[in-house]
Amino acid sequence: MRVTDTSDLWWKSAVIYCLDVETFYDADGDGTGDLEGLAQRIDYLAELGITCLWLMPFYPSPDRDDGYDLTDFYGVDPRLGNHGQLVEVIRTAHDRGINVIADLVVNHTSDRHPWFQAARRSTSNRYRDHYVWRDTEPPDTSKLVVFPDREDSIWELDDRTGEWYLHNFYKHQPDLNLANPEVVDEILRVVGFWLELGFDGFRVDGIPFLEQNAKNIGDPALVVDPHELMRTIRGFLNRRAGHAMMLGEVNLAHPQQLDFFGGDSADELQMQFDFIGMQATYLALAREDAGPIVTALQERPAIGVTCQWATFLRNHDELTLDKLGDAERAEVFAAFGPEPEMQLYDRGLKRRLPTMLGGDPRRIRMAYSLMFSLPGTPTLYYGEEIGMGEDLAADGRMAVRTPMQWSAGRNGGFSTAAPSRLVQRVVPGACGPEHVNVVSQVHDPDSLWSFMRKLISIRRTCPELGWGTWSVVDQPSAQVLVQRCQLDGSAVVTVHNLGADPVTVDVPIDPRDDGLEAVDLMAEEVVTGAATTRVALEGYGFRWLRVRPAGDLAIP
Ligand code: NOJ
């Protein structure tokens, strides 16, 4: 690997931060976050050290699925601002060394999108084939619905035309017919449009459903090959912008994920979220046993050099545990979400990490250190850097979509509007802004924010973790994970104690006597030049060591 590769394939050593403009910062005081407010907070993100900003949907939308139900692929929701302000956000971010990616929703639109409004006027309407219809009574699909509290079928009868349309998500989100070349052409124009405006890529929403449709629709004329579609979008994306990246939401088994990377050709998605590794991490945290993480990482398929996993602990949806076995999921529920109001759809938890870990600062830091040390690109959800909690009284997934907590002041400093006008209320109680906020933490060297900033800065000096060859270092303690990522002549060895009890482990540093030494990246000091170093960890302790030739003056 040449150092210049790290800029060409920037996503392999990035730190990604996801936010929703509407809940980040309200500059005009109307109760809804806006692009002007985000522009004012870009320096905050730069100070934290993130290098890629993922904007959740900002398109015009009736907002019945938090913007994932859009009515205009080319628009900006006027509540958030306009195209000019969006360009200012992107330009300011670029100036601070931050790439910006947009959520791209290709699976469906809102039922209020002009295409669907036209499509449902008659079976011969010009836009009819932009969506997926059937003229016979659908079979029972109640097992396939994503939101079982709201839907009982993935087909909905359209009264006016007497046919059923497909909707994998809510019935107000009809699925697009991606087997129709006109729709694909439009998607490509959308991609081209936002690239031209300055975006550096996309987080691509709901990809498994493209595949599921192929299996469920039945009608060969409507079946889309999801891989051909991904190759088409990827080819177009990189013809228009060589540096642009697609990060896919593909919560599928490893072999299918490998297919969505494009297998050996690596010509589909460059990045995918590591849903399996994330779920295994929660099982490991619940058991205080590193085993599930080791298994998940060892089972990860090998991916192309341009490809990358995005590691994460939380996002804007429920913490899905769908890839765990029933008994394993029950273990995680018991440990981190025992009350019914913390659970969602029998498969997940509507909580943020700090509350799940009982607010224990040692365990919270260890969990983030662990996630940042896994091979891949770490991804944060806004508010994680200060340890925001959830609002369990909010409806479903909205529990983790509360306003950013900037200060202890009115509305947590998010907005000057009357609290009743806020897009969503701020978290009440022990995790509320009086106790958890940016202002108090940036001035406190011992705060979670200061820790996260340091973690991010260390992670950014470790291309080994994004690029290197990963292995588990054998040692006898089940509660400890020792990993080594090797890249050319340098390695990063991380040691994490998932358990509450102190433990001491022997970590091989230079078993072949190659003249290596280890530097503690957190303490910034040489710890050993010995073949094996004895690492003593407190309960939930961790250590990051860089192993390199003794006396090598590379910084750090
Ligand atoms: C996945 C998104 O993460 C989720 O929030 C949304 O509801 C569905 N896709 C539908 O767009």
Image: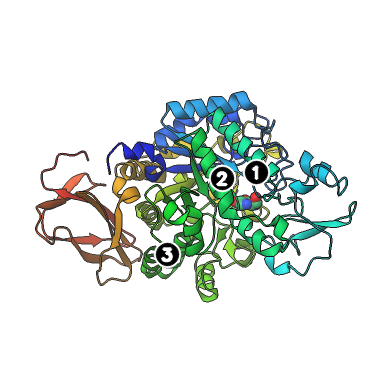
Q: Are marks 1 and 3 in contact (CB under 8 Å)?
A: no
Q: Quadrant location of the C terminus?
A: top left
Q: Position of residue 270 (x, y in %)?
A: 46, 47
Residue 14 position by quadrant: top left
Label 3 crowding class (10 Å Cα cut-off): few <14, some 14-19, many 20+?
many
CA separation, marks 1 and 3? 42 Å
Query: As rendered, which of 175 and 446 lies closer to the eye?
Result: 175
Q: Is residue 100 visible?
A: yes
The CA span between labels 2 and 1 is: 9 Å
- Name the kind of residue labelled 2 in the image: Thr
Q: Mark 3 is on which residue type?
A: Leu
Find disc 1 in the rendering and name its residue. Answer: 184
Which numbered disc, 2 or 3, marks the residue closer to the eye?
A: 2
Q: Which residue is mark 3?
A: 285
Residue 132 in the image: x percent, y percent? 75, 53
Circle number at residue 232:
2
Residue at x 47% of width, y 53% of height: 261
- The vertical placement of 333 against 361, above or below, is below
Q: Amino acid at mark 1?
A: Val
The circle on residue 253 is none
Give the quadrant of the N terminus: top left
The reply to whether dot 2 and dot 1 touch (C-beta < 8 Å) is yes
